[in-house]
Amino acid sequence: MARRGERRSERGRPGRDRVRTAREGDAGGVAIVVATPGDALEPLALQGSGPSVDIVCAQPGTPDERAALGRAVAHAAARGVRVADEPWVIDAEPGKTTARVLDALRELRPLLVTTLDPDPEHASIDLEANRPVVTEPPLRGSVARATIAAARTYQRECGSPVFVRCHRAGAPATLGDRACARHPLPLRWLVRGVDGRLSAYLPSAAGVLRWTERRVGGDEWSGPELLEGPDLLPGLEVVQDAQGYVHLFGLRRRKRPDGEKYVDVVHTTQYQSGRPPGPWHSAGNPHGNDPAKSREVGFPAAAFDAGGGLHVFARNIGHGISTRRQGADGRWSGWQHLRGVMVADELTAQSGGSGDPEVWARARDTAAAIRWHRGTPPGEWTLDATGSVGPVPGSLSAAPDAGSVRYRYAGSNEVCVQMPGAGAVSLGGPDGTGPVAAVAGVGIQGWGCTVLVRSGESGACLVGAHADGRPEGGVWWFDAGETSVVPPAVAVDGLGRAVVALLGADGRLRIARQEPGASGLAFASWTVVRPTV
């Protein structure tokens, strides 16, 4: 394994030309930035065929680690993954890791940067000190934090989108990309605003990116625009209220007066399409500003109730769910702990059939998903563990029908929907990974239908449909002809047409609209959204 200085001296200045040529051929690459070679094994195992992959290590690691990485590279090559040249070792010194990683990103010019969890999970609790005990090597977290900071700076320098994924420490690749991610990508990231124009929101290294239709149902878009706001961790939750306003939720790391860092939930509201959103506000943290406990909080999920109240849910350090409500007057309740079952970091919140919110969570220790809802007495949270939802990790999502949830069945990988008062219904589609996004109320040959989109093999965008409220009729899936580096999204535009959105390997938004009057569900050719101001 060569050091960075040796690599550059061997190749000289033409090394930049080599990277540029690779970018032109690959339209963006992947940089896996980790502490030592052994840390790259699981992130590399998740890579599919497509853009080339560079591995950057802060330290050279042990001979066994280097040998294991060599085997992993060979296995990746066998399934079509191109790992570029030999791994880099940047020999980062304390206080210089961010600068060294930034140098590597400037050379490699990646679209996607993968690193480890910046806030690794604790292994136990020191009862005497009441503090979590983290056994992960400190270098892993410090390199991940440095990588997030370097990617943020790099994106602001180059002006092009850069996306960061944080692989949860110790999570095996067999769980799939979404279940291994510390900060999930949104599923409902394409939404129609109050004025009928569509907007797309995705988290990037430097903050939230937004694309907006210039006119209702038109092919011209503005963006991507980098929304002003705090330095967010690389994830996003997108929720729309009854008035059609868009609410964005994320996590940020803040500094206490004593210099210690903690993490809190933040959110902002988009009132008018294409206009600046409102200021970002803190929703706090179940553990306050405790520097050790707060950093492990799970990514938030949110939903509105019939009275306009906002409910925020987050997995706490004890692997329970904590929730609080913001009333229509803007006042927050205290955090409430929903007891009953330990959960994984996979929450889905939605409005139930009564208009009250509910939250689904994948159980931590069993292949099941559990639902909490507000029942009787009014306002009290009730655990419903009677459902037969057995999801593949990373596949849980809310369905458009109130109180319904979609997931991949752990026994077959088929897409299923669970509706209130009914058993699970299979929607087929056992190929691919991850969750399904959907939108109801699409007109197809005079029928109101639900259009679904999901990721197939190698990131293929697959589309299907069924009659609204009647999934038992079955779904015919078809390949939409494009691949996406994020889960595809779907919405209904201001003209009533289904619109599918994805992000290509070149970092550009792609849009396909439903063909009006077609005999069945058909889409026009994909439109590549060119960067505009």
Image (tube, grey):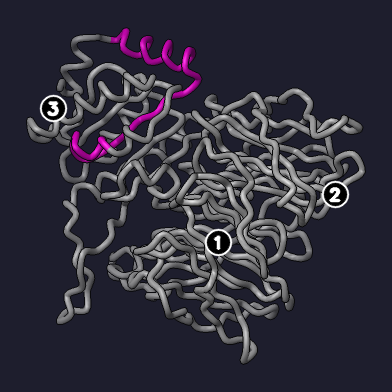
Single out the mark in the foreground, 2 or 1: 2
Is residue 402 depicted above or below 519 in this figure?
Answer: below
| Residue type, label 3 | Ala
Which range of residues does the magenta coloring cover?
A: 13-41
Residue in the picture at 28% in, 65% down: 259
Callout 1 environment at 10 Å: few (<14), some (14 to 19), or many (20+)? some
Name the residue that disc number 1 marks.
Answer: 348
Q: Secondary structure at mark 1?
A: strand
| Residue type, label 2 | Gly
Is residue 67 depicted above or below 400 in this figure?
Answer: above
Residue in the picture at 16% in, 33% down: 91
Q: Position of residue 38 (x, y in %)?
A: 19, 37
Name the residue that disc number 3 marks.
Answer: 67
Calculate the distance from the C-alpha at mark 2 to the C-alpha at mark 1. 25 Å
State the predominant SS element of the stretch in magenta.
helix
Label disc, if present, on residue 448 of the rendered structure: 2
Is residue 187 depicted above or below 286 in this figure?
Answer: above
Q: Secondary structure at mark 3?
A: helix
Q: Position of residue 327 (x, y in %)?
A: 65, 79
Q: Nearer the viewer, residue 401 or 43?
A: 401
Q: Mark 2–mark 3 contact, CB under 8 Å?
A: no
Can you see residue 278? Answer: no
Q: Is residue 41 left or right of residue 501?
A: left
Can you see residue 290? Answer: yes
Q: Position of residue 56 (x, y in %)?
A: 26, 30
| Residue type, label 1 | Thr
Residue in the picture at 35% in, 19% down: 82
Say which label, 1 or 3, has the lower sequence index: 3
